[in-house]
Amino acid sequence: MPFLQRARRQGAEFLNPVPTAKGVENGMLPIIWKMLRGPEERVPNPALAPFRTEAAACAGPAADLRVTWLGHSTVLLELDGRRILTDPMWASYASPVPLGFGKRFFPVPLALQDLPPLDLIVQSHDHYDHLDPATLRQLARLQPTVPVLCPLRVGRYYAEAGWAPQLIHELDWTDSFQVADLTVTAVPARHFSGRGITGQNQTLWASYVLQGPRHRVFFGGDTGPFLAGHTEIGAAYGPFDLTMLEVGAYGEGWPDIHLGPENAIQAHQALGGKVLLPIHWGTFNLAFHSWREPVEQVQELAAAAGIPLLLPKPGVPTEVEPAGFISRWWER
Protein backbone atom coordinates (compact mmCIF):
# COMPACT_ATOMS: atom_id res chain seq x y z
CA MET A 1 0.00 0.00 0.00
CA PRO A 2 1.44 3.40 -0.92
CA PHE A 3 1.90 5.77 2.01
CA LEU A 4 1.73 9.02 0.07
CA GLN A 5 -2.01 9.45 0.25
CA ARG A 6 -4.54 11.46 2.19
CA ALA A 7 -5.11 10.68 5.86
CA ARG A 8 -7.65 8.00 6.73
CA ARG A 9 -10.24 8.41 9.48
CA GLN A 10 -12.27 6.23 11.76
CA GLY A 11 -15.25 8.25 12.88
CA ALA A 12 -13.93 11.58 14.21
CA GLU A 13 -10.37 10.27 14.65
CA PHE A 14 -7.49 10.39 12.21
CA LEU A 15 -5.48 7.20 11.75
CA ASN A 16 -1.77 6.64 11.44
CA PRO A 17 -0.37 5.28 8.17
CA VAL A 18 0.64 2.09 10.05
CA PRO A 19 -0.66 0.61 13.33
CA THR A 20 0.73 2.71 16.19
CA ALA A 21 0.62 2.44 19.97
CA LYS A 22 0.84 5.78 21.79
CA GLY A 23 2.50 4.24 24.84
CA VAL A 24 0.18 5.92 27.34
CA GLU A 25 -2.56 3.30 27.30
CA ASN A 26 -2.07 2.59 31.02
CA GLY A 27 -2.44 6.25 31.95
CA MET A 28 -0.17 9.24 32.35
CA LEU A 29 0.25 9.14 36.14
CA PRO A 30 2.86 6.32 36.20
CA ILE A 31 4.80 8.11 33.46
CA ILE A 32 4.69 11.46 35.26
CA TRP A 33 5.78 9.81 38.51
CA LYS A 34 8.76 8.16 36.82
CA MET A 35 9.70 11.42 35.12
CA LEU A 36 9.75 13.24 38.44
CA ARG A 37 11.61 10.52 40.35
CA GLY A 38 14.12 9.07 37.89
CA PRO A 39 17.87 9.06 38.71
CA GLU A 40 19.03 10.36 35.33
CA GLU A 41 20.18 13.95 34.87
CA ARG A 42 16.95 14.95 33.19
CA VAL A 43 17.56 18.67 33.71
CA PRO A 44 20.90 20.51 33.31
CA ASN A 45 22.63 20.88 36.68
CA PRO A 46 23.84 23.53 37.20
CA ALA A 47 21.27 25.38 35.14
CA LEU A 48 22.26 26.58 31.70
CA ALA A 49 23.18 30.22 31.31
CA PRO A 50 20.67 32.05 29.09
CA PHE A 51 21.40 32.29 25.38
CA ARG A 52 20.70 35.64 23.77
CA THR A 53 20.25 36.46 20.10
CA GLU A 54 20.11 40.12 19.12
CA ALA A 55 17.57 41.13 16.49
CA ALA A 56 20.38 42.35 14.22
CA ALA A 57 21.73 38.79 13.91
CA CYS A 58 18.62 37.74 11.98
CA ALA A 59 17.96 40.99 10.13
CA GLY A 60 18.62 41.71 6.49
CA PRO A 61 17.79 39.56 3.47
CA ALA A 62 17.10 35.91 4.18
CA ALA A 63 19.93 33.49 3.37
CA ASP A 64 19.93 30.64 0.85
CA LEU A 65 20.02 27.94 3.54
CA ARG A 66 20.47 28.86 7.18
CA VAL A 67 18.90 27.78 10.46
CA THR A 68 18.48 29.41 13.83
CA TRP A 69 17.55 26.66 16.27
CA LEU A 70 15.54 28.26 19.06
CA GLY A 71 15.03 25.09 21.07
CA HIS A 72 12.99 21.90 20.75
CA SER A 73 11.19 21.98 17.36
CA THR A 74 11.15 25.75 16.93
CA VAL A 75 13.43 26.66 14.03
CA LEU A 76 13.79 29.89 12.08
CA LEU A 77 14.60 28.44 8.68
CA GLU A 78 15.95 30.57 5.84
CA LEU A 79 15.41 28.79 2.55
CA ASP A 80 16.20 30.34 -0.83
CA GLY A 81 15.52 33.84 0.44
CA ARG A 82 12.35 32.98 2.40
CA ARG A 83 11.91 32.80 6.18
CA ILE A 84 9.86 29.98 7.70
CA LEU A 85 9.16 29.50 11.41
CA THR A 86 8.38 25.95 12.52
CA ASP A 87 6.25 25.06 15.55
CA PRO A 88 6.38 28.45 17.32
CA MET A 89 6.59 27.74 21.05
CA TRP A 90 7.86 30.42 23.47
CA ALA A 91 6.10 29.11 26.62
CA SER A 92 8.08 28.34 29.77
CA TYR A 93 6.40 24.95 30.20
CA ALA A 94 5.52 22.24 27.68
CA SER A 95 2.44 21.16 29.60
CA PRO A 96 -1.04 22.45 30.43
CA VAL A 97 0.04 23.08 34.04
CA PRO A 98 3.51 24.11 35.32
CA LEU A 99 4.89 20.75 36.46
CA GLY A 100 8.60 20.15 36.90
CA PHE A 101 9.01 17.69 34.04
CA GLY A 102 7.89 20.19 31.41
CA LYS A 103 9.93 23.26 32.36
CA ARG A 104 12.08 24.87 29.68
CA PHE A 105 15.84 24.55 30.27
CA PHE A 106 16.58 28.01 28.90
CA PRO A 107 14.49 30.94 27.66
CA VAL A 108 14.01 31.15 23.92
CA PRO A 109 17.13 33.03 22.77
CA LEU A 110 15.30 35.33 20.34
CA ALA A 111 12.42 37.42 21.67
CA LEU A 112 9.21 37.23 19.69
CA GLN A 113 9.34 40.93 18.93
CA ASP A 114 12.86 40.48 17.53
CA LEU A 115 11.85 37.94 14.91
CA PRO A 116 12.49 39.22 11.39
CA PRO A 117 9.55 39.43 8.99
CA LEU A 118 8.34 35.91 8.25
CA ASP A 119 7.12 34.49 4.97
CA LEU A 120 5.43 31.45 6.47
CA ILE A 121 4.65 29.61 9.71
CA VAL A 122 4.54 25.81 9.59
CA GLN A 123 2.81 23.87 12.39
CA SER A 124 3.31 20.10 12.70
CA HIS A 125 0.58 19.22 15.25
CA ASP A 126 -1.20 20.45 18.35
CA HIS A 127 0.75 19.00 21.31
CA TYR A 128 1.72 21.34 24.14
CA ASP A 129 5.45 21.22 23.40
CA HIS A 130 4.78 22.38 19.82
CA LEU A 131 1.82 24.75 20.00
CA ASP A 132 1.31 27.48 22.60
CA PRO A 133 -1.78 29.74 22.26
CA ALA A 134 -0.11 32.63 24.13
CA THR A 135 2.77 32.55 21.65
CA LEU A 136 0.32 32.56 18.76
CA ARG A 137 -1.57 35.54 20.19
CA GLN A 138 1.64 37.54 20.41
CA LEU A 139 2.67 36.54 16.89
CA ALA A 140 -0.74 37.53 15.56
CA ARG A 141 -0.19 41.04 16.92
CA LEU A 142 3.42 41.30 15.78
CA GLN A 143 3.15 39.73 12.31
CA PRO A 144 -0.54 39.67 11.42
CA THR A 145 -0.16 39.03 7.68
CA VAL A 146 1.96 35.85 7.77
CA PRO A 147 0.29 32.80 6.20
CA VAL A 148 0.09 29.67 8.35
CA LEU A 149 0.23 26.03 7.25
CA CYS A 150 -1.09 23.41 9.63
CA PRO A 151 -2.67 19.95 9.52
CA LEU A 152 -6.41 19.48 9.30
CA ARG A 153 -8.44 20.91 12.22
CA VAL A 154 -5.41 22.62 13.80
CA GLY A 155 -6.25 25.96 12.23
CA ARG A 156 -8.72 26.85 14.98
CA TYR A 157 -5.85 27.55 17.38
CA TYR A 158 -4.54 30.18 14.99
CA ALA A 159 -8.03 31.58 14.38
CA GLU A 160 -8.61 31.88 18.13
CA ALA A 161 -5.25 33.65 18.45
CA GLY A 162 -6.30 36.34 15.98
CA TRP A 163 -5.22 35.18 12.53
CA ALA A 164 -7.49 36.13 9.65
CA PRO A 165 -9.21 33.04 8.15
CA GLN A 166 -7.73 33.64 4.70
CA LEU A 167 -4.21 33.29 6.15
CA ILE A 168 -4.83 29.86 7.71
CA HIS A 169 -4.31 26.92 5.37
CA GLU A 170 -5.14 23.47 6.71
CA LEU A 171 -3.49 20.67 4.77
CA ASP A 172 -4.22 16.99 4.47
CA TRP A 173 -1.33 14.67 3.72
CA THR A 174 -0.07 15.22 0.12
CA ASP A 175 -1.65 18.70 -0.07
CA SER A 176 0.69 21.49 -1.18
CA PHE A 177 0.77 25.25 -0.69
CA GLN A 178 2.88 27.79 -2.53
CA VAL A 179 4.33 31.07 -1.27
CA ALA A 180 6.02 32.83 -4.18
CA ASP A 181 8.65 30.32 -5.36
CA LEU A 182 8.46 28.13 -2.23
CA THR A 183 6.30 24.99 -2.29
CA VAL A 184 5.40 23.21 0.95
CA THR A 185 3.79 19.77 0.99
CA ALA A 186 2.32 18.00 4.02
CA VAL A 187 3.31 14.34 4.12
CA PRO A 188 2.38 11.47 6.45
CA ALA A 189 3.89 11.12 9.91
CA ARG A 190 3.46 8.49 12.60
CA HIS A 191 2.30 10.18 15.77
CA PHE A 192 -0.94 11.29 17.46
CA SER A 193 -2.64 14.49 18.55
CA GLY A 194 -4.73 16.09 21.27
CA ARG A 195 -4.40 18.48 24.18
CA GLY A 196 -6.39 16.58 26.79
CA ILE A 197 -7.27 13.14 28.11
CA THR A 198 -10.27 12.95 25.79
CA GLY A 199 -10.72 13.95 22.17
CA GLN A 200 -7.39 12.63 20.97
CA ASN A 201 -6.52 12.19 17.28
CA GLN A 202 -9.31 14.54 16.20
CA THR A 203 -6.72 16.85 14.65
CA LEU A 204 -4.16 15.70 12.12
CA TRP A 205 -0.36 15.63 12.47
CA ALA A 206 2.13 15.95 9.61
CA SER A 207 5.68 16.23 8.40
CA TYR A 208 6.55 18.71 5.65
CA VAL A 209 8.58 18.92 2.47
CA LEU A 210 9.81 22.46 1.76
CA GLN A 211 11.00 23.00 -1.82
CA GLY A 212 12.65 26.19 -2.96
CA PRO A 213 14.13 26.84 -6.40
CA ARG A 214 17.57 25.70 -5.20
CA HIS A 215 17.21 23.73 -1.96
CA ARG A 216 14.95 21.15 -0.34
CA VAL A 217 14.33 20.69 3.37
CA PHE A 218 12.39 18.03 5.28
CA PHE A 219 10.77 18.99 8.60
CA GLY A 220 9.69 15.86 10.43
CA GLY A 221 7.70 17.43 13.26
CA ASP A 222 6.97 14.50 15.58
CA THR A 223 7.02 11.06 14.03
CA GLY A 224 7.85 7.53 15.06
CA PRO A 225 9.76 4.93 13.04
CA PHE A 226 8.32 4.95 9.53
CA LEU A 227 11.06 3.58 7.31
CA ALA A 228 8.91 2.48 4.37
CA GLY A 229 7.06 5.79 4.41
CA HIS A 230 10.24 7.85 4.64
CA THR A 231 11.73 5.84 1.78
CA GLU A 232 8.68 6.65 -0.33
CA ILE A 233 8.81 10.34 0.62
CA GLY A 234 12.51 10.46 -0.22
CA ALA A 235 11.91 8.88 -3.62
CA ALA A 236 9.09 11.31 -4.41
CA TYR A 237 10.57 14.55 -3.06
CA GLY A 238 14.22 14.05 -2.19
CA PRO A 239 17.10 14.25 -1.98
CA PHE A 240 17.08 16.83 0.82
CA ASP A 241 19.84 19.33 1.51
CA LEU A 242 18.70 19.33 5.14
CA THR A 243 16.49 17.12 7.26
CA MET A 244 15.17 18.37 10.61
CA LEU A 245 14.35 15.26 12.64
CA GLU A 246 13.50 14.69 16.29
CA VAL A 247 16.05 12.80 18.37
CA GLY A 248 14.76 13.34 21.92
CA ALA A 249 11.85 12.39 24.18
CA TYR A 250 11.97 8.70 23.27
CA GLY A 251 11.38 5.79 25.60
CA GLU A 252 10.86 2.04 25.75
CA GLY A 253 7.24 2.60 26.70
CA TRP A 254 6.42 4.57 23.54
CA PRO A 255 8.55 3.17 20.68
CA ASP A 256 6.06 4.04 17.93
CA ILE A 257 5.59 7.79 18.29
CA HIS A 258 9.10 9.28 18.49
CA LEU A 259 12.21 8.49 16.48
CA GLY A 260 15.10 8.75 18.91
CA PRO A 261 18.69 8.87 17.62
CA GLU A 262 18.89 5.48 15.91
CA ASN A 263 15.63 5.80 14.00
CA ALA A 264 16.41 9.43 13.12
CA ILE A 265 19.61 8.28 11.41
CA GLN A 266 17.67 5.62 9.49
CA ALA A 267 14.95 8.11 8.53
CA HIS A 268 17.55 10.61 7.32
CA GLN A 269 19.11 7.95 5.09
CA ALA A 270 15.73 6.77 3.78
CA LEU A 271 14.77 10.35 2.92
CA GLY A 272 17.97 10.89 0.96
CA GLY A 273 19.15 13.52 3.41
CA LYS A 274 22.52 15.24 3.21
CA VAL A 275 22.87 17.23 6.46
CA LEU A 276 20.86 16.31 9.56
CA LEU A 277 19.67 18.90 12.08
CA PRO A 278 18.60 17.06 15.26
CA ILE A 279 15.63 18.79 16.90
CA HIS A 280 13.23 18.03 19.78
CA TRP A 281 15.98 17.65 22.39
CA GLY A 282 17.88 19.71 24.96
CA THR A 283 14.94 21.97 25.83
CA PHE A 284 12.34 20.18 27.98
CA ASN A 285 12.34 17.18 30.31
CA LEU A 286 9.83 14.97 28.51
CA ALA A 287 11.27 11.45 28.83
CA PHE A 288 13.32 9.14 31.06
CA HIS A 289 16.71 9.65 29.42
CA SER A 290 19.29 12.21 30.51
CA TRP A 291 19.06 15.54 28.75
CA ARG A 292 22.39 15.01 26.93
CA GLU A 293 21.78 11.41 25.86
CA PRO A 294 20.07 12.18 22.52
CA VAL A 295 22.86 14.43 21.25
CA GLU A 296 25.60 12.09 22.46
CA GLN A 297 24.01 9.08 20.79
CA VAL A 298 23.17 10.81 17.53
CA GLN A 299 26.77 12.01 17.19
CA GLU A 300 28.11 8.49 17.62
CA LEU A 301 25.63 7.00 15.17
CA ALA A 302 26.09 9.75 12.58
CA ALA A 303 29.87 9.41 12.71
CA ALA A 304 29.60 5.68 12.05
CA ALA A 305 27.22 6.28 9.15
CA GLY A 306 29.18 9.19 7.66
CA ILE A 307 26.29 11.65 8.12
CA PRO A 308 27.15 15.33 8.67
CA LEU A 309 25.30 16.86 11.62
CA LEU A 310 24.25 20.44 12.18
CA LEU A 311 24.24 21.11 15.93
CA PRO A 312 24.33 24.89 16.36
CA LYS A 313 24.30 26.80 19.61
CA PRO A 314 20.74 27.81 20.48
CA GLY A 315 19.83 31.10 18.86
CA VAL A 316 22.89 31.38 16.62
CA PRO A 317 22.09 31.73 12.89
CA THR A 318 24.11 28.97 11.22
CA GLU A 319 24.68 28.33 7.54
CA VAL A 320 24.02 24.79 6.34
CA GLU A 321 27.32 23.58 4.92
CA PRO A 322 27.91 20.13 3.38
CA ALA A 323 30.28 19.18 6.19
CA GLY A 324 27.80 20.17 8.90
CA PHE A 325 28.80 21.89 12.14
CA ILE A 326 28.92 20.76 15.77
CA SER A 327 29.07 23.56 18.34
CA ARG A 328 29.25 21.36 21.49
CA TRP A 329 27.34 23.99 23.49
CA TRP A 330 25.88 21.24 25.74
CA GLU A 331 29.35 20.24 26.98
CA ARG A 332 29.85 23.62 28.71
Image (tube, grey):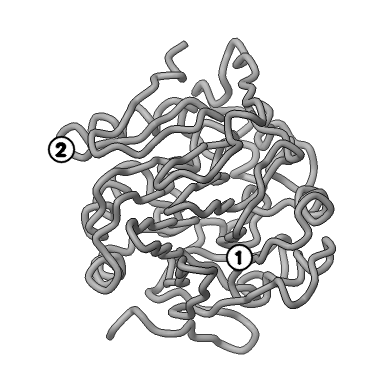
Q: Is residue 34 above or below residue 179?
A: above
Q: Residue at x 60, y 16 (%)?
A: 48
Can you give x and y, in whole percent of width and height, for residue 172 in the image? 53, 80
Q: Nearer the viewer, residue 256 or 87?
A: 87
Q: Nearer the viewer, residue 177 or 329?
A: 177
Q: Is residue 253 rendered to the left or right of residue 94?
A: left
Between discs 2 and 1, the one toward the N terminus: 1
Q: Is residue 23 rendered to the left or right of residue 240?
A: right
Query: Crowding near pointer 2: few (<14 within 10 Å), some, many (20+)?
Result: few
- Mark 2 and mark 1 residues within 8 Å of each other at the beta carbon: no
Q: Amino acid at mark 2?
A: Gly
Can you give x and y, in whole percent of width and height, for residue 12 in the image? 65, 85
User: Which element type, helix, strand or loop, lies under badge 2?
Assistant: loop
Tell me the residue that label 2 is attached to: 306
Q: Is residue 213 rendered to the left or right of residue 23?
A: left
**Numbered badge on residue 224:** none
Can you give x and y, in whole percent of width and height, for residue 6 in the image? 45, 84
Mark 2 or mark 1, which is nearer to you? 2
Q: Nearer the viewer, residue 21 or 308?
A: 308
Q: Nearer the viewer, residue 154 or 58?
A: 58
**Numbered badge on residue 193:** 1
User: Which element type, helix, strand or loop, lies under badge 1?
Assistant: loop
Q: Residue at x 40, y 42 (%)?
A: 247
Q: Is residue 294 above or below residue 22?
A: above
How much space separates mark 2 and mark 1, taking CA atoms? 34 Å
Query: Crowding near pointer 1: few (<14 within 10 Å), some, many (20+)?
Result: many
Q: Amino acid at mark 1?
A: Ser
Q: Residue at x 48, y 77 (%)?
A: 176
Can you give x and y, in whole percent of width and height, for residue 276 in the image? 32, 43
Q: Residue furthest bottom?
A: 11
Q: Residue furthest front?
A: 61
**Res 42 → quadrant:** top right
